[in-house]
Image (tube, rainbow, N blue to C red):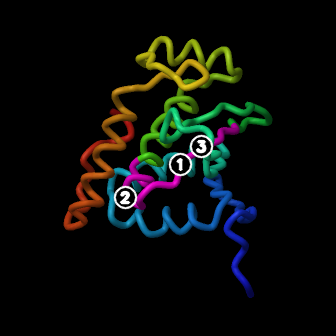
């Protein structure tokens, strides 16, 4: 059986759905080396969300990654994470950062884009966006930094940050 092409859809029935082969490979390779990333993936997989993860378009360079609320329907929250493809450790750190945002959205119970905007106005800090308003949270920044540190030091499995912080 031949692997799907790099730009093709990667079929998945799990809640975390990488849309590119390289993203699935990144998750499989980085997860054992980062307790923080693992501590974000586990609750994301049982959160009641379907999270698609794709590569960001090349012309979207004002950010490294972003989480987009797509819909809430039938008891599921549908999210899309877009990542720029950087060095593997850096991209894994971006993924951890965006997974933290996914958990923030799902745990809040929001069901519309307007509610997501209000959530981040309440819990986040606004930053200059490339084309649209952007918000960030201290928890997402910590998750990304901790993942990067763990992957650089790969000799520890103790989480540097917990998803519930």
Mark 1 to mark 2 CA distance (whole Å): 12 Å
Crowd tier of the residue under label 1, counting other residues whose Cα lies within 10 Å: few below 14, some 14–19, many 20 or above: many
Q: Would you say residue 89 sits in the magenta stretch? A: yes
Q: What residue lies at 42% left-to-right and 61% top-to-bottom?
A: 88
Q: Name the residue under label 3.
A: 81
Name the residue at the right extreme.
74
Q: Distance between the residues labelled 2 and 3?
A: 17 Å
**Coordinates of residue 128 in the picture (x, y in percent):** 47, 19
Number of marks drawn: 3
Q: Which of 94 and 37 is in front in this view?
A: 94
Question: Residue 13 bears which disc, if any?
Answer: none
Q: In which quarter of the image is residue 68?
A: top right
- Residue 52 higher or lower than 18, as above or below: above
User: Badge 1 is on which residue?
Assistant: 84
Residue 148 in percent (x, y) is at 31, 52
Tell me where the magenta segment starts and ends, as one range: 78-93
**Is 76 placed left or right of 158 in the picture?**
right
Q: Is residue 140 above or below residue 39?
A: above
- Under circle 2, the secondary element is helix
Q: Mark 2 points at which residue?
A: 89
Q: Residue furthest front?
A: 59
Q: Mark 2 near mark 3, Cβ–Cβ under 8 Å?
A: no
Q: Quadrant of the N terminus?
A: bottom right
Which residue is pictured at 60% across the width and 38% down the height?
Answer: 60
- Name which of mark 1 and mark 2 comes first in the sequence: 1
Q: Real-space Cα distance between discs 1 and 3? A: 10 Å
Q: Which of marks 1 and 2 is in front?
A: 1
**Residue neighbourhood size for the residue with mark 3, other residues' Cα within 10 Å, grouped as few (<14), some (14–19), many (≥20):** many
Q: Which residue is at a point 59% across and 16% down the rendered structure image?
A: 117
């Amino acid at each position: 059986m031949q692997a799907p092409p790099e730009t093709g859809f990667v079929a998945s029935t799990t809640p975390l759905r990488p849309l590119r082969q390289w993203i699935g490979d990144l998750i499989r390779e980085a997860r054992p080396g980062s307790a923080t990333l693992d501590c974000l993936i586990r609750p994301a997989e049982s959160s009641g969300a379907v999270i698609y993860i794709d590569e960001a378009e090349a012309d979207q360079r004002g950010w490294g990654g972003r989480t987009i609320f797509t819909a809430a329907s039938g008891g599921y929250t549908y999210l899309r994470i877009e990542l720029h493809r950087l060095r593997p450790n850096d991209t894994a750190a971006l993924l951890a950062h965006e997974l933290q945002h996914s958990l923030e959205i799902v745990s809040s119970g929001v069901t519309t884009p307007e509610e997501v905007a209000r959530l981040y106005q309440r819990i986040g800090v606004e930053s200059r966006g490339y084309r649209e308003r952007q918000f960030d949270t201290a928890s997402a920044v910590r998750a990304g930094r901790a993942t990067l540190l763990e992957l650089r030091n790969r000799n520890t499995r103790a989480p540097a940050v917990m998803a519930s912080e």
